[in-house]
Image: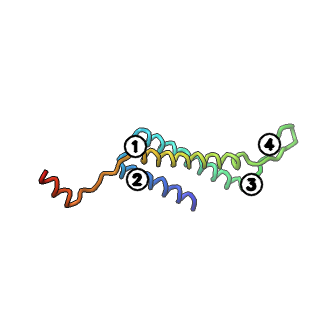
Amino acid sequence: MRKQKKDNTFDDLLELAKEYHVENNALFLAAARQYQTQARVIELMRAQLEEDGSAVSTKEYVKGRENVYANPMIKELPKHADSASRTLSTMLEIIKKLGYKQEKETALGLFDKEFE
């Protein structure tokens, strides 16, 4: 369910980018590609954690002796999720700072232009 919210947020930002005419801005496009990469990495990490089914891993340092430690992805996943959230924030900032919304012309405005 959480993935759906992230996808909605990303899709909403893409729509906003079109509305504010920054959908072809190089900075916006770079941030969008970065977010898509981050989202794929996060999904792969989550899938691996679910596949492992355990929060611990073992590694053999000395022949025959295993050391048990926390799965490294447990520590890394929040870092990647935070980074993806910051990328979405960057996309929003680009829209705010570089975008402009084209005002719809009102009937009164069209009439006024006719007589200028």
How many numbered markers are drawn?
4
Give amino acid for label 1.
Leu
Q: Residues within 10 Å of mark 3 (few under 14, many from 20)?
A: few
Residue at left offset 34%, top offset 51%:
101
Give how far across and how far down residue 38 sits, in percent.
56, 45
The kind of secondary structure element at disc 3 is loop
Cα distance between the residues tagged 2 and 3: 40 Å
Q: What residue does disc 4 label?
A: 59
Give amino acid for label 4.
Lys
Q: Is residue 66 left or right of residue 55?
A: right
In terms of image quadrants, where is residue 53? bottom right
The kind of secondary structure element at disc 2 is helix
Give amino acid for label 3.
Ser
| Front tag of 1 and 2 | 1
Give how far across and how far down residue 20 sits, in percent.
36, 49
Q: What residue does disc 3 label?
A: 54
Q: Earlier in the sequence, mark 4 or mark 3?
A: 3
The kind of secondary structure element at disc 1 is helix
Q: What residue does disc 2 label?
A: 16
Q: Earlier in the sequence, mark 2 or mark 3?
A: 2
Cα distance between the residues tagged 4 and 1: 50 Å
Q: Earlier in the sequence, mark 1 or mark 2?
A: 2
Cα distance between the residues tagged 1 and 3: 46 Å
Q: Earlier in the sequence, mark 1 or mark 3?
A: 3
Q: What residue does disc 1 label?
A: 98
Give how far across and how far down residue 16 sits, in percent.
40, 53
Q: Earlier in the sequence, mark 4 or mark 1?
A: 4
